[in-house]
């Protein structure tokens, strides 16, 4: 089930405080330096840093492109 857009707008990456985008069962930080991805389990975002993963740049850029997030070069 998608996260309510109003609720999603209140969430931020706990490392960089950057906005997050919902991508399937994950929330992905829009920060190009950290590229963190957080799992959503049973409709509950798990924003614990030790449970997150760092995406490679190509995978992160593809997600940002899919969600029309402007990426700074």
Image (tube, grey):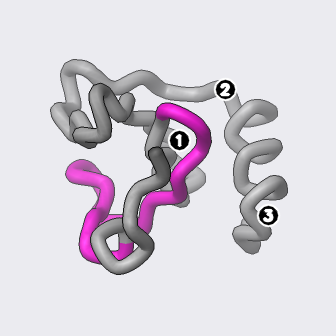
**Residue 71 seen in this snapshot:** yes
Q: Is residue 25 above or below residue 71?
A: above
Q: Secondary structure at mark 3?
A: loop
Residue at 36% across, 76% down: 9
- Tell which circle, 2 or 1, labels the residue nearer the N-terminal end: 1
Bin the neighbour count of mark 3 within 10 Å (Cα to Cα): few under 14, some 14-19, many 20 and up: few
- Which of 68 and 70 lies nearest the eye of the viewer? 68
Bin the neighbour count of mark 1 within 10 Å (Cα to Cα): few under 14, some 14-19, many 20 and up: some
Q: Secondary structure at mark 1?
A: loop
Distance CA(mark 3)–CA(mark 2): 15 Å
Residue 35's tag is 1
Q: Quadrant of the C terminus?
A: bottom right
Residue 6 in picture, x, y percent from top left: 35, 79
* Residue corresponding to mark 3: 73
Distance CA(mark 3)–CA(mark 1): 14 Å
**Is there a contact, CB below 8 Å, between mark 2 and mark 1?**
yes
Chain part drawn in magenta: 9-25
Residue at 23% across, 40% down: 44
Q: Secondary structure at mark 2?
A: loop
- Which of 46 and 61 lies nearest the eye of the viewer? 46
Residue 65 in picture, x, y percent from top left: 82, 57
**15 left or right, relative to 29:** left
Residue 22 part of the magenta-drawn span? yes
* Residue corresponding to mark 2: 56
Tell us which disc is closer to us: 3 or 1: 1
**22 left or right, relative to 51:** right
**Is there a contact, CB below 8 Å, between mark 3 and mark 2?**
no
């Amino acid at each position: 089930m998608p996260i309510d857009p109003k609720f999603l707008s209140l969430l931020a990456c706990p490392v960089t405080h950057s906005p997050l985008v919902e991508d399937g069962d994950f929330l992905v930080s829009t920060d190009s330096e950290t590229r963190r991805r957080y799992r959503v389990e049973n409709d509950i975002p798990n924003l614990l840093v030790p449970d997150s993963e760092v995406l490679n740049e190509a995978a992160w850029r593809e997600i940002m492109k899919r969600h029309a997030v402007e990426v700074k070069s």
